[in-house]
Image (tube, grey):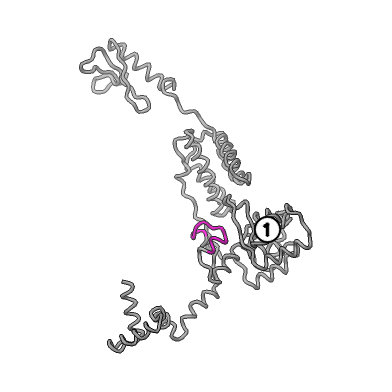
């Protein structure tokens, strides 16, 4: 029996109450038990503490193998997604690392070791982020269901992906790529550059997804799991019309009946032959957004056409060419550009122009100086 300052711990007499009392805490709540004698109180206190240590009185948390919660998470995610097994490869990496280990004993250090091993294998930071995201989601679900108290993955700092690399086709590079690419794959590459659709979205398109009257494509299964409609320009409409005339397909036939492996191999070979490596099929989506931006499309239009949810996501795709930027700053060298820019909004009618002349004659200001002063007043 532990003692403190000559008194037995957990045993006391309560003012105004008979007998001896035992005090213990259950789940953070204070509980009292009455005994007739001090010796009975000592025996009861000792028994309660012993049961606590053995897990009889206070129920111990049961071990939850990581493998178990990982499989449950994959089943839950696949039941809600049209595309199955998206997270399987990443989850298998964590299952290899933790397996039957109690999920409650996983430490941030163990997680960092797995990420370090992935980095040593040459994996990109974006790949590491996706692996960590899957683990966080798995442990968060277990925590939400009461299987875990904490999520150690939240203490691990995710590496910052480098999305600065600009990859889009110039007109000359587009010509080179199509020259090196087998003719069978020309239609899907051209459609990707003119619609911004992802490779998977293109391969899942059927002839029933084309609305010829409105001129739009219906994408039933996007990356975000939503349904959206994409407009077709004249090049895409002409291309599809030609393919339909050549094949006479049924409505449920795919527009692009390509095997993804053969498409990837042919595309990679053409990229190397054209001398534009590194360039991926997904970079055709970059090309789509960049060309729209260089033609003056605003962010709202780009987000609607590309299916992006935020300007932050859009900034990864809509790159402007150095030549386009040079033309923008070169415009400043044109004569009277500044004066026209400043004064033009102020002179919207003949009456406003006459009023401006009167003010010039009275105040003695040059038109440009007066316009600047008026603009300063408007700003403040």
The reply to whether residue 351 is visible in this rendering is yes
**Label 1 crowd bin: few (<14), some (14–19), many (20+), radius 10 Å:** many
Farthest residue, direction top: 36
State the residue position of label 1. Answer: 210
Q: Which of 374 and 310 is in front in this view?
A: 374
Element type at mark 1? strand
The residue sitting at 50% across, 42% down in the picture is: 110
The reply to whether residue 120 is visible in this rendering is no
**What main secondary structure does the magenta stretch of the protein show?**
helix
Q: Which of 251 and 110 is in front in this view?
A: 251
Looking at the image, is 119 positioned above or below residue 378? Answer: above
Quadrant of residue 182 within the rendered picture: bottom right
Q: What stretch is highlighted in magenta?
A: 301-313
Query: Is 62 placed left or right of 221 in the picture?
Result: left
The residue sitting at 52% across, 63% down in the picture is: 164
Q: Nearer the viewer, residue 373 or 203?
A: 373
Q: Position of residue 107 (x, y in %)?
A: 47, 40
Q: Nearer the viewer, residue 123 or 254?
A: 254
Quadrant of residue 36 within the rendered picture: top left
Q: Position of residue 373 (x, y in %)?
A: 32, 79
Q: Quarter of the image for the N terminus: give it.
A: top left
The residue sitting at 49% across, 50% down in the picture is: 158
Q: Position of residue 114 (x, y in %)?
A: 54, 45
Q: Where is residue 63 in the image (x, y as percent from the top left)?
A: 51, 30
Magenta stretch holds residue 113 = no
Q: Quarter of the image for the C terminus: give it.
A: bottom left
């Amino acid at each position: 029996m532990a003692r403190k300052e000559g008194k037995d711990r957990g045993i006391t007499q309560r003012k105004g109450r008979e007998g001896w009392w035992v005090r213990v805490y259950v789940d953070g709540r204070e509980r009292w038990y009455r005994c007739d004698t001090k010796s009975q109180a000592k025996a009861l206190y000792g028994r309660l503490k012993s049961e606590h240590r053995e897990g009889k009185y206070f129920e111990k948390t049961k071990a939850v193998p990581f493998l178990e919660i990982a499989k449950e998470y994959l089943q839950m995610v696949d039941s809600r997604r049209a595309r199955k097994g998206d997270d399987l490869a990443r989850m298998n990496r964590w299952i290899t690392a933790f397996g039957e280990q109690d999920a409650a004993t996983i430490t941030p250090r163990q997680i960092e070791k797995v990420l370090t091993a992935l980095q040593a294998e040459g994996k990109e930071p974006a790949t590491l982020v996706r692996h960590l995201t899957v683990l966080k989601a798995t442990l968060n679900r277990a925590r939400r269901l009461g299987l875990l108290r904490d999520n150690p993955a939240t203490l691990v700092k995710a590496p910052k992906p480098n999305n600065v690399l600009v990859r889009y086709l110039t007109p000359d590079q587009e010509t080179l790529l199509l020259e090196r690419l087998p003719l069978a794959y020309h239609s899907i590459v051209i459609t990707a550059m003119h619609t911004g659709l992802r490779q998977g979205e293109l391969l899942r398109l059927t002839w029933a997804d084309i609305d010829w009257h409105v001129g739009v494509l219906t994408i039933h299964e996007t990356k975000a799991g939503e349904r959206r409609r994409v407009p077709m320009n004249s090049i895409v409409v002409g291309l599809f019309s030609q393919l339909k005339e050549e094949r006479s397909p049924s409505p449920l036939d795919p527009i692009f009946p390509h095997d993804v492996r053969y498409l990837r191999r042919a595309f990679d070979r053409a990229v190397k032959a054209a001398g534009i490596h590194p360039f991926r099929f997904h970079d055709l989506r970059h090309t789509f957004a960049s060309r729209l931006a260089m033609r003056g499309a605003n962010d709202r239009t780009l987000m609607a056409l590309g299916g992006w949810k935020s300007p932050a996501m859009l900034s990864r795709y809509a790159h402007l060419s150095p030549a386009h930027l040079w033309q923008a700053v070169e415009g400043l060298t044109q004569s009277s550009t500044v004066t026209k820019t400043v004064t033009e909004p102020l002179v919207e009618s003949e009456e406003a122009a006459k009023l401006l002349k009167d003010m010039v004659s009275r105040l003695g200001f040059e038109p440009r100086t007066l316009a600047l002063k008026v603009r300063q007043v408007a700003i403040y």
